[in-house]
Image (spheres, rainbow, N blue to C red):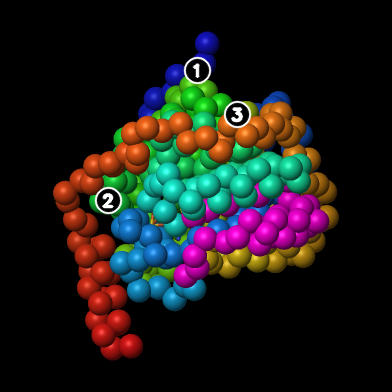
């Protein structure tokens, strides 16, 4: 039977003397994985900016005044070219992100399904992160050949309310459940450095660790504090916190790929090495995440050589999905789900919105 975790037990692990924590995490890492293999995933923003949500960390929310270039949905041929480029650079997975609140049953979704089929046929693991998703939509994505779906919890349920008001934590859990029911590998993690406490971090891990099945992949992002967002003035996350978070995740979700995600441009080589030691087994590669910078692939290759790491092949942890034409038939008769919007507003988000308005007038 799967071990049940309490927040207190996870906090106890998180607060161990760092050297003990690292040793324990490295031991668990070796038990379940080849510690010299790192999964390389490339992010591709297939639709950028203009999102109606108010996620306080996100440069793609339309209501904040950030300096990003917005783009409509990419074509299938553009995606194929980017996927081939990523594959030739050693990526085994392509993660396509769209700045959507939720998937809609329309031509754009049909186009994404074609992208999924095309990339799956290139023998790469295909991951999507498209916002909230119904069970029907999950089934269609699975039929098209989707391997994984990324949908982060981002923080504890309590802290989530301080960061986002346009949807609820329960909405996130529902989408994760829908991915699971469709047999799609779940990728879910969070962000540290958003003003949360250690208890919030461990509370998020408690929910992830008690999921059945546990997520196959857990991204740990350090907040990229983007100018114009409500979190623009957050202090950078100390590397020690990142190593603690990675190590604790490795121990409580032992079989998952733990992904050292956003924030690597601010980490030294030694800091990243510490995270690999703590059990990180994946990175996002390429000089851009979705809209913010990421280390150049040549820097990662150099560090891999120094540390003796190598890229992991695709489909080691699960079979390649077989794309079948059922994805072309929309099974939903109900149309799009109406997601409920909580009524409360977040002062910090309102302030960023007001600043954006003034800046727009001045521009
Ligand atoms: N719109 C979809 C959603 O929210 O699920 C998918 C795209 S969204 C950009 C994917 C994830 O990126 C978020 O859940 C969050 O964890 C991460 N993210 C966004 N902005 C970030 C930032 N400034 N720093 C760190 N992580 C960030
Ligand atoms: C995840 O956990 N981190 C990635 C991916 N999943 C989609 C996104 C990071 C985004 C960082 C901010 C940006 O580049 O816009
Ligand atoms: Fe939109 Fe996703 Fe950004 Fe939230 S995190 S504003 S849902 S793109």
Q: Specify the label residue 3 is tagged with.
A: 1
Element type at mark 2:
loop
317 with respect to 305 (left or right):
left
Looking at mark 3, is its residue's CB closer than 8 Å to ligand 2?
A: no
Q: Are marks 3 and 1 in contact (CB under 8 Å)?
A: no
**Residue marked by disc 3:** 254
Q: Is residue 85 magenta?
A: yes
In the depicted structure, whether residue 109 falls above or below residue 147 = below
Magenta part of the chain: 70-98
Task: Please rate how many residues cluster around mark 3, counting C-alpha atoms within 10 Å: few if below 14, some from 14 to 19, many from 20.
Answer: many
- The percent coordinates of residue 94 (x first, y second) are 65, 49
- The percent coordinates of residue 50 (x first, y second) are 39, 65
**Total number of numbered discs in the rendering:** 3
In the depicted structure, whether residue 58 falls above or below residue 310 = below
Quarter of the figure with residue 301: bottom right
Task: Please rate how many residues cluster around mark 2, counting C-alpha atoms within 10 Å: few if below 14, some from 14 to 19, many from 20.
Answer: some
Looking at marks 1 and 2 on the same chain, the residue that comes earlier in the sequence is marked by 1
- Front residue (pair 27, 168): 168
- The percent coordinates of residue 201 (x first, y second) are 41, 42
The Cα atoms of the two marked residues, 3 and 1, are separated by 11 Å
- The answer, for residue 229, to whether it is visible in the render is yes
Q: Specify the label residue 120 is tagged with.
A: none
**Residue marked by disc 2:** 166
274 with respect to 60 (left or right):
right
């Amino acid at each position: 039977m799967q071990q049940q975790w309490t927040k207190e037990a996870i906090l106890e692990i998180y607060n161990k003397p760092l050297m003990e924590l690292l040793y324990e995490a490295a031991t668990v890492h070796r038990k379940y994985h080849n510690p010299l293999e790192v999964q390389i995933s490339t992010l591709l923003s297939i639709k950028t900016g203009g999102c109606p949500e108010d996620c306080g960390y996100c440069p793609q929310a339309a209501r904040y005044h950030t300096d990003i270039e917005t783009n409509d949905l990419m074509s299938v041929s553009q995606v194929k070219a980017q996927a081939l480029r990523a594959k030739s650079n050693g990526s085994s997975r392509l993660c396509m992100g769209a700045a959507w609140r939720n998937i809609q049953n329309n031509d754009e979704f049909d186009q994404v399904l074609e992208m999924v089929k095309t990339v799956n046929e290139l023998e790469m693991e295909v991951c999507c992160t498209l916002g909230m998703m119904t069970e029907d939509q999950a089934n269609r994505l699975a039929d098209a050949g989707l391997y994984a779906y990324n949908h982060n919890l981002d923080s504890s349920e309590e802290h989530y309310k301080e960061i986002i008001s346009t949807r609820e934590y329960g909405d996130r859990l529902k989408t994760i459940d829908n991915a699971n029911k469709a047999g799609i590998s779940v990728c879910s993690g969070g962000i540290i450095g958003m003003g949360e406490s250690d208890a919030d971090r461990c509370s998020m891990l408690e929910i992830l660790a008690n999921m059945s099945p546990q997520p196959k992949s857990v991204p740990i992002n350090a907040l990229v504090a983007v100018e114009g967002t409500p979190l623009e003035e957050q202090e950078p996350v100390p590397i020690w916190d990142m190593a603690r978070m990675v190590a604790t995740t490795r121990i409580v979700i032992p079989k998952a790929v733990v992904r050292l995600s956003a924030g690597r441009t601010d980490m030294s080589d030694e800091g990243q090495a510490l995270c690999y030691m703590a059990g990180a087994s994946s990175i996002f590669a390429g000089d851009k995440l979705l809209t913010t910078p990421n280390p150049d692939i040549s820097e990662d290759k150099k560090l891999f050589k120094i540390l003796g790491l190598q890229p992991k092949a695709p489909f080691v942890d699960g079979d390649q999905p077989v794309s079948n034409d059922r994805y072309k038939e929309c099974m939903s008769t109900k149309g799009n789900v109406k997601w409920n919007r909580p009524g409360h507003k977040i002062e910090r988000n309102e302030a960023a919105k007001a600043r954006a308005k003034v800046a727009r007038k001045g521009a």
